[in-house]
């Protein structure tokens, strides 16, 4: 993804300046008069990695009105979506009992589940506080609606833990809500704050939704096949917590009866190494390639949504980021 941005130096320079302001706004908004709160906030700032969502929001703003400067409202909303995203990471690590995030200890490992829960809530409440500083109620309502959708996606996934009959459509509904919805909102807010037509905003939201779906599918592939030192977070947590993802859903649907029973027997055990065993059973099958092809198809569909934008370096950068979702290793 970094390469896609560096390929356009003028965009990279403008984006770096805007993201630096986002980071400053992030720290200023979360500043507390309590040292214990500030310590945790400083620690969670290391969760900041690709900054995909604020980057997409800012690029969508640049691409929707080429030649016009990104507005303060865009930078504020970029900060808001990053706060919401980081809150979901903190809460996800609690649910998954994950120990590693960005190659370091998770907040729940460092400070305990209670502190991690409250820190996630602190991030969300400040996201709404910052969002309320804007005059645009439509943007605030979109952030609130999106956060509700993310929570619904998490609850739907929890309701389907250890459901070894989970089908593809329910899986897509889960990741569409818990991951793609926030990427959709980020891409929609860029043109929205530049007062582009609602149809253009919807189309940009569609772009974000498709690459958000593809991003999560690749994330789920990496959870089964990746290297923890490269990916930078705890792997194998999906199966450990009874979450079926696309590669395994496909494998169970297409396996010969004997192989399917063997996989189901492994899934139903409490063996701590079941993730390794199941991963080995699907690594050399069509199922990993099937999931990657599905992600590639989603990215191809995402490209089509960018047709509403005028040709510009920012639009080209969005195309590059979409392609980079498929090739990433972390």
Image (cartoon, helix red, strand yellow):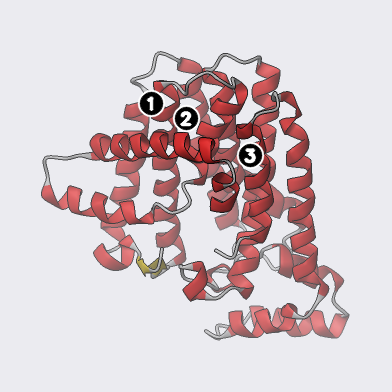
Instruction: Identify the residue at image location x=46%, y=16%.
Output: 137
Residue 209 occupies quadrant: top right
Marks 3/2: CA distance? 25 Å
Q: Position of residue 203 (x, y in %)?
A: 70, 28
Image disc number at residue 144: 2
Asked whether the viewer can see residue 148, the reply is no
231 on left or right of 184: left
Marks 1/2: CA distance? 9 Å
Between 115 and 223, the residue placed more toward the observer is 223
Asked whether the viewer can see residue 144, the reply is yes
Instruction: Identify the residue at image location x=60%, y=79%.
Output: 275
Check if mark 1's residue and mark 2's residue have beta carbons within 8 Å. yes
Q: Which residue is mark 1?
A: 131
Foreground: disc 3 or disc 1: 3
Foreground: disc 1 or disc 2: 1
Q: Position of residue 41 (x, y in %)?
A: 25, 49
């Amino acid at each position: 993804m970094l390469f896609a941005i560096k390929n356009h130096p003028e965009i990279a320079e403008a984006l770096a300046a805007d993201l630096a302001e986002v980071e400053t706004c992030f720290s200023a908004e979360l500043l507390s008069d309590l040292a214990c709160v500030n310590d945790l906030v400083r620690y969670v700032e290391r969760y900041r990695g690709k900054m995909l969502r604020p980057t997409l929001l800012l690029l969508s703003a640049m691409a929707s009105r080429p030649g016009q400067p990104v507005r303060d409202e865009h930078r504020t909303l970029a900060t808001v979506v990053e706060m919401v995203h980081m809150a979901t990471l903190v809460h996800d690590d609690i649910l998954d009992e994950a120990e590693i995030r960005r190659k370091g200890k998770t907040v729940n490992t460092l400070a305990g589940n209670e502190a991690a829960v409250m820190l996630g809530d602190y991030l969300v409440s400040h996201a709404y506080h910052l969002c309320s500083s804007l005059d645009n109620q439509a943007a605030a309502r979109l952030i609130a609606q999106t956060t509700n959708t993310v929570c619904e996606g998490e609850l739907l996934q929890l309701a389907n833990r250890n459901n070894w009959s989970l089908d593809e459509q329910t899986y897509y509904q889960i990741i569409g809500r818990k991951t793609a919805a926030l990427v959709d909102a980020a891409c929609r807010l860029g043109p929205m704050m530049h007062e582009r037509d609602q149809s253009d905003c919807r189309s940009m939201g569609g772009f974000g939704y498709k690459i958000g779906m593809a991003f999560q599918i690749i994330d789920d592939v990496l959870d089964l096949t990746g290297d923890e030192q490269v990916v930078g977070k705890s792997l194998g947590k999906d199966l450990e917590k009874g979450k079926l993802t696309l590669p395994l859903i496909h494998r169970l649907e297409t396996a010969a009866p004997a192989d399917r029973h063997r996989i189901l027997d492994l899934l139903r055990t409490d063996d701590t190494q079941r993730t390794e065993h199941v991963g080995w059973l699907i690594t050399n099958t069509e199922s990993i390639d099937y999931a990657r092809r599905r992600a590639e198809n989603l990215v191809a569909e995402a490209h089509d949504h960018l047709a509403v934008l005028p040709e510009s370096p920012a639009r080209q950068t969005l195309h590059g980021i979409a392609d980079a979702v498929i090739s990433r290793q972390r």
